[in-house]
């Protein structure tokens, strides 16, 4: 029973740390007057030089299409982005930052990315590689486990 307790306790710590990281981003978004979804939308546009589509955002950031659609409509209404239909597919739209959106990216997203980069650089190269490798492995195994027991996440 000791091993189960250790695994249970370790998972509790892991999940609490995950939620703590999530809360850091949530507070950052809140402090800048944007939603969590808007933060990640703007982040993805910043990282990809504004060449993202709705479908790309959903796939890369694991958001449901309706969540992304709602956030996009809000950002479009605020004049932060414009949407342009992808030829041959009226439902999937390409997302572009307006001048206002580019300013928000410079003042909100760029400092966040720099903080992340400084933080990541404080880890030794081996630690960075291990963090990414083990996190990726955990995600893969968890997805496989969920698929095998019928509680698929996808």
Image (cartoon, grey):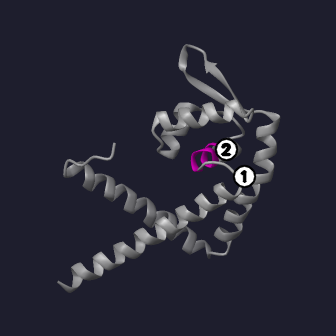
Mark 1 nearby-residue class (10 Å; few <14, some 14–19, many ≥20): many
Q: Which of 70 and 115 is in front in this view?
A: 70
Q: Residue 108 in the image: state x and y as whole percent.
A: 75, 53
Q: Which of 48 and 36 is in front in this view?
A: 36
Q: In the rendered structure, which disc, 2 or 1, sits on the residue that comes first in sequence?
A: 2
Query: From which residue to which does the magenta span run?
Result: 36-42
**Which numbered marker is on residue 42?**
2
Vertical relation: 77 (above or below) 40: above
Q: Residue 135 in the image: state x and y as whole percent.
A: 45, 63
Q: Which residue lies furthest to the bottom in this view?
A: 2
Q: Say which residue appears at 50% left-offset and 38% top-offset.
A: 67
Q: Say which residue appears at 52% left-offset and 45% top-offset.
A: 61
- The image quarter in which residue 7 lies: bottom left
Q: Say which residue appears at 48% left-offset and 39% top-offset.
A: 59
Residue 41 falls within the magenta-colored stretch: yes
Side (left or right) of 18 relative to 99: left
Q: Dividing the image into 4 quarters, which one contains the C terminus?
A: top left
Q: Nearer the viewer, residue 114 or 104?
A: 104
Q: Say which residue appears at 62% left-offset and 44% top-offset.
A: 38
């Amino acid at each position: 029973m000791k091993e189960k307790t250790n695994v249970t306790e370790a998972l509790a710590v892991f999940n609490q740390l995950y939620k703590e990281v999530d809360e850091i981003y949530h507070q950052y978004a809140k402090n800048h007057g944007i939603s969590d979804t808007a933060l990640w939308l703007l982040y993805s546009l910043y990282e990809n030089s504004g060449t993202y589509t709705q479908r790309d955002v959903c796939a890369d950031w694991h958001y449901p299409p309706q969540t992304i659609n709602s956030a996009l409509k809000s950002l479009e209404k605020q004049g932060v982005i414009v949407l342009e239909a992808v030829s041959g597919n009226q439902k999937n739209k390409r997302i572009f930052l307006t001048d206002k959106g580019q300013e928000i990216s410079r003042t909100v997203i760029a400092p966040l990315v720099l903080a992340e980069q400084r933080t990541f650089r404080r880890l030794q190269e081996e630690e960075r590689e291990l963090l990414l490798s083990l996190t990726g492995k955990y995600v893969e195994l968890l997805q496989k486990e969920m698929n095998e027991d019928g509680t698929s996440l996808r």
